[in-house]
Amino acid sequence: MSASGDDDAARINRGNDPFLHVSSTISGCPTPQGPFVTQQEWLDEAHYRIERGNSCWIAGRCRLSNSYDYDKDIAESVTRRLNALSAAMDWRDKTSLWLTIQRRFIYLDGCVSRDFDRAHFVPALGETADVERVIDRTKVHP
């Protein structure tokens, strides 16, 4: 296999989307794929990514011209929110979580204990400034 073939198959965060590992209490929880894609996957999604990124500005719902431009600030804000939530609930003790932030969406991946309070935690993440939606893809892990 050529060097370029190796580069094409490499999974890289090609969009520089924030990917945060925020807790790691539950052992054996697999690391999610996050925003890491191959070159071919990136090319396949490029048109749709541009279209999705610009659509909120065209519709007049965003102050920035591309919804991906919010992601770095959202990552900083959600980190502060998570620290504040630690005082209100023991979420770190009951989870192994990763956050992927793309176009004002927070994708929540990982493992949670059976007694983890998703009903409070997920909406609290959604209250972060400029977040449009939180997508909970966590799994209960005993």
Image: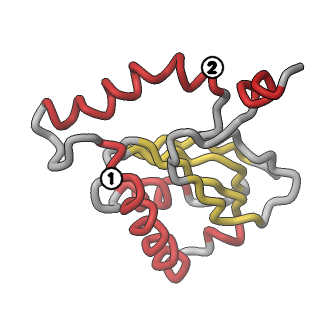
As drawn, is 108 to the left or to the right of 92?
left
Could you give the CA–CA distance between mark 2 and mark 1, rounded to whole angstroms?
25 Å
- The vertical placement of 125 against 41, above or below, is below
Residue at the far bottom in the pictured view: 87
- The vertical placement of 62 against 76, above or below, is above
Q: Quadrant of the N terminus?
A: top right
- The vertical placement of 9 against 27, above or below, is above
Q: Residue at the spot x=41%, y=44% of the render?
A: 105
Between 91 and 44, the residue placed more toward the observer is 44
SS of the residue under disc 1: helix
As drawn, is 56 to the left or to the right of 128?
left
- The numbered mark, 2 or 1, whose residue comes first in the sequence reads 2
Q: Amino acid at mark 1?
A: Tyr
Residue at the far top in the pictured view: 44
What number is the disc on residue 40?
2
Q: Residue at the spot x=35%, y=28% of the render?
A: 50
Between 12 and 112, the residue placed more toward the observer is 12
SS of the residue under disc 2: helix
Q: Residue at the spot x=32%, y=49% of the render?
A: 69
Residue 77 place in picture, x, y as percent: 39, 68
Q: How many marks?
A: 2
Residue 141 place in picture, x, y as percent: 78, 49
Between 132 and 100, the residue placed more toward the observer is 100
- Look at the numbered discs 2 and 1 and tell me whether their residues touch, using CB distance below 8 Å: no
Residue 102 place in picture, x, y as percent: 44, 43
The nearer-to-camera label among 2 and 1 is: 2
What number is the disc on residue 70?
1
Q: Residue at the spot x=75%, y=25% of the render?
A: 4
Within 10 Å of the Cα at label 1, are there few (<14), some (14-19), or many (20+) other Cα atoms?
Answer: many
As drawn, is 61 to the left or to the right of 55?
left
What number is the disc on residue 110?
none
Within 10 Å of the Cα at label 2, are there few (<14), some (14-19), or many (20+) other Cα atoms?
Answer: few
